[in-house]
Image: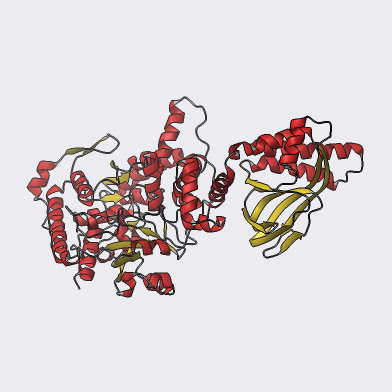
Amino acid sequence: MRRKELLDLWNHASVKVMDVRHQIVQPMEVFSYSSLPSSVYVYAVRGQAEVMLDERVHPVFGCHVIHCGKGIALEIVAEKTEFEFYILFYKAVIPLQSRQEIMDLLEMRNWFSLPYHFVVPRPILLLDKIEKLQDVWQGGAATAAQTLYAKALFQLFVAELLEQMHDAEERGESGDLVWQAKQFIHAHYSEPITLATIAQKLRYSAPYLSKQFKQHTGHSPIDYLIRVRLEKAKAFLLQTEAPLQEIAQGVGYSDLSYFIRAFKKHTGVTPGQFKEQAESAIWEAGSEYPVKRLRSSLVQSSPRYYNLINNENHYQKEEGESVQRFRNGTKGKMHKWMLGLALLLSACSGTGSGGAVSSSPPQVATPVPAAASPQEAKQQWPRTYVDATGKEVVMAKQPQRIVVTHFGMMEYFFALETPPIASTLAERMLGSFETLKPYAKTAAVKDIGEVTTPNLELMTELEPDLIVAFTGTHNDVYEDLSRISTVAMIDNVEERTWAQTLREYAKLIGKEPLAETYIAKLEALMTEAKDKMASKKDKTVTFLRASGDGSTFYVLDDNDVSYAFDEKSGLGLTSPGKYKQEGDVVTLEGITVLDPDYIFLVDHLDSVDTTLAELNKSKVWRSLKAVKANHVYPLDVSISTKGPIAVEYTTKELLRALSE
């Protein structure tokens, strides 16, 4: 209705542009008129501000249009950062000879004098017109032609403005609120956002905002936020070569594993699989030009934390770390170089070790029997293993010199008493993960660099008899790896349990009996722990990992440590329930909704004391039952690998804490 009435009035109006100004207001500065000399359009293009019209406050951020009539008091106060806007002064008159219905409308609702506002869905189109208008106005409207040109540009601005009102027509206050919420999400999707954050910015209660948003869109604000983030992520995946960690951070996920899970939940595939399928579709369609990738640096990588994941294999790099990339343009030459080097090394050194010594450390308090006898091993080989891509991997003898292309694989091979001779990020993970530190003393595992771009030259020198890689993550380097040695591609699906994954690796290297023994012993340990913790069955437990901003958390209960709550095959603990107010991050206030009896804080153990010290400054944190009872316990971040050694470590730590 509003848009139709405005169109009727503007189509009959005689218009004069009075002034055009471009303003930038610094934080806490005030731009004001006690009484506007004419009607105005205020077009906000950057920053946040409170705009007061006759003492009614409107929070404004992003691209926003506000109209107000002559005589209205206008006050604009910038918040936090500078606020940039254009203000157009104009006068519009309806000729007396106009149709009666137009005169009746003018008398009933004179939209040239009434205040209204809305969020601009296509801001660039409006900005282009208003910048051209300002250029003409600054040039001086001294001639009749310049005056006419300015008037024409102003009318084009108004026409575009009214066209963009179409999406907001007949929505009323709640519709404006939904538009504001959407625009806030689009402007801040890369930041930590909760329902409470959006509601606070819009000066509405969270329940009211959620209800109005769902009525108009069919989705909750957080569902909409997730959709926006994932659509942005899809675009970045297809248009850039940015590392997955940067893409995750660039769309608001500081924890890569949660980004991957959210992506898979909403798309059915991991980010790597999505990119691979999209590129395959282009080639299958016969496109002469594959997807163009552009180098991108979306955000700065955090220098502090690693993100542990199952399906995608990236991590956050330490500051100053060089990134070794195997560029497509040099692959042909490198293939020949590696093949020649492999032949040369073979001729010169026979079956030398390449500097890596394989040894088998004792398990972390879980002894395992010896591997199959030489006679049993002889009967098992040669064997053919069908990998995750459907390829038949033929192995003439039992692999001994194994290279893994993701650090998360290491613990499976340690559990199978076959330490890999090399792994990506080996030095760092063996030195920092509590679960792997015991093996650092006895297993010589060479560090072959980055996960997605391993050091191919060093791998060639090591002369492995088997390379284990992940589908999706290592498809791009499969051909390079296959020129070095036999390659088995593993699909490390999220739904697969630690025991199922251990059996898969055991089948690959002929250690099935050892795997079953390990599984039996660990399941026995878990059963024992479950029985001893049964007295705490009426107590609730949750696992929290700080997101990095100091005030929000990831709840790991139904992901990284889901086995802790599994009544049938896990530890049978009682969860306080899923976070009810939606979202991929939970505020401190959200934790009070859970209010568990026990909290396990997942962090790097060398920094958990600092994290706790900061949390203890918060009254909200100190109000939690677990904190009051001194039932907050640290867990090393390595539990997020969800491997057998991580499960064993977690079980023992839980038993120690909950059997006190």
Which image quarter is the C terminus in? bottom left
Task: Tell me where residue 606 appears, x and y as whole percent.
Answer: 36, 71
Give how far across and how far down residue 307 sits, in percent. 39, 56
Please count the marks in the image: 0
Q: Closer to the camera, 344 or 574?
A: 574
> Is residue 457 positioned above or below 303 on the image?
above
**Residue 13 vs residue 430, the one in the foreground:** 13
* Residue shown at the point (16%, 67%) measured from the top left: 535
Where in the figure is residue 246, as x and y percent of width and height? 48, 52
Q: Is residue 387 visible?
A: yes
Q: Is residue 485 left or right of residue 42?
A: left
Q: Residue furthest top?
A: 286
| Side of 652 relative to 639 (left or right) | left
The one of 8 and 26 positioned closer to us in this rendering: 8
Whether residue 347 is visible to the viewer of this picture, yes or no, is: no
Q: Residue at x 84, y 34 (%)?
A: 96
